[in-house]
Image (tube, coloured by chain):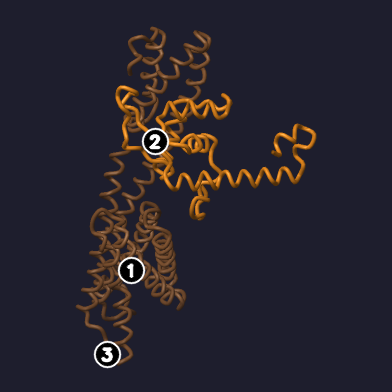
Amino acid sequence: MRERNSAPASIDLSVQIYTWLLAAYPERFRAEYGPHMAQVFRDVCQRESRRGGLPGMAALWARTSLDLIRTSVEEHIDRGIDMNRENFVRWSGWALMAGAVLFAAGLILGSFDTNYSDPIGGLDAFYEISQIVGIVLGQILFVIGLLGLRAGYGTRSGSVGGALLLIAVIGGVVSLGGMLIMNSSELGWTAWALGLLTMTLALTGYGGVAIRRRVFSRWNFAPLLAGVVIPVLFGVSAAIDSSGGSMEDWTFALGVSATAVGLILLGYRMQAEAATTSQALA
Amino acid sequence: MAEGVKGPERFLPLTPAVFHILLALADGEKHGYAIMQEVEDMTEGRVQMGPGTLYGSIKRMLAAGLIEESDDRPDPALDDERRRYYRLAALGRKVLRQETERMAGLMALARRKHVWSGVGSRSIQT
């Protein structure tokens, strides 16, 4: 700043005090804009000193103090909102990974059950309980994970991507509801299957969007892998059933495992990218 | 910024600070202090932005894609080369146009309702 040497001492003192007061802003904002704010304040000080002398400087300080208090609070609120969202996305990434493991374990263990109406006890009962606990907990965690996915990536996924994520969340909720009423209503099975199909089909569609728009920094294929296998399994199973056969257990286990791998990769990316953003915001 | 509304409309109505900054940049790129001076000149001193309001708004406008930082740096002999210059982005120009159209619509409505009748309406209607 070329005029600094000729500036009156009151201007240098004012700028020094203002520079100290910039500590009221969040560190990231201060690092980005602090020097420019101080420079603008120096320019305004020089103008007000020329125009109005000491009373002009006093009026400038009154205005600037109010501005500093109001905008530093705004910036802290902004930073808090960003941090909360990134924390939610990070934890929902972990929820998606845990949900994938529980869901896959529940379905695979449940497929070993030979008698669905046996009394509690024995190995079959273990398979049944594992299936119920795994699928119910898994689906709760899926809904949390999908909500986090929408919160963190909805905007950058565009209107179609955002809508598909919303449909996936709704599918997850319907499926979970169906699971919870399965014992008391026949509609439960239908709701569970349709909800799961909706959720995975929407995730498949979102996978296409993610690949096209490069929503994630890496592994943009993960949502497609997480979504596409379950609808294919539904289709293959229906075709085999109609011809009087039944699906091989290993085909089913392989398909569910592929879905789980897709969800784990997706959840890992979510928590890793959110953790990086949180560090940058801190 | 209303959720669910697409295009420039989602930014409307603009806050006074954002509107005045867009207006100040409408005729070319400027650095922070020049924006502040232009706003004061345009409004005959009625709007005086502090550095916090100016740079808080600039931060949000950059993030929303309304303005962009200019890569051009001034001649060090003419200005401080550390200053950052900002200019309107294409979206910012659209938003500014839509906001002024919205305001013009409100002016037309107020005129139809004779809001200014008997209080210097002639100068307002021109």
Query: Where is A225 relative to A217, above or below?
Result: below
Which chain is disc 3 placed on?
A: A
Q: Nearer the viewer, residue B32 or A251?
A: B32
Tag 1, which secondary structure? helix
Q: In the rendering, which numbered label is found on residue A204?
A: 1
Between disc 3 and disc 2, the foreground one is 2
Tag 3, which secondary structure? loop
Q: Nearer the viewer, residue A89 or A30?
A: A30
Going by the numbered disc 1, the residue's amino acid type is: Thr
Q: Which residue is mark 3?
A: A245
Residue sitting at x 43%, y 73%? A191
Q: Which residue is mark 2?
A: B86
Q: CA distance from mark 3 to mark 2?
A: 69 Å
Tell me, what hue is chain A?
brown
Q: In the rendering, which numbered label is found on residue A91?
A: none
Q: Position of residue A199 (x, y in %)?
A: 38, 68
Going by the numbered disc 2, the residue's amino acid type is: Tyr
Query: Where is A69 relative to A125, above or below?
Result: above
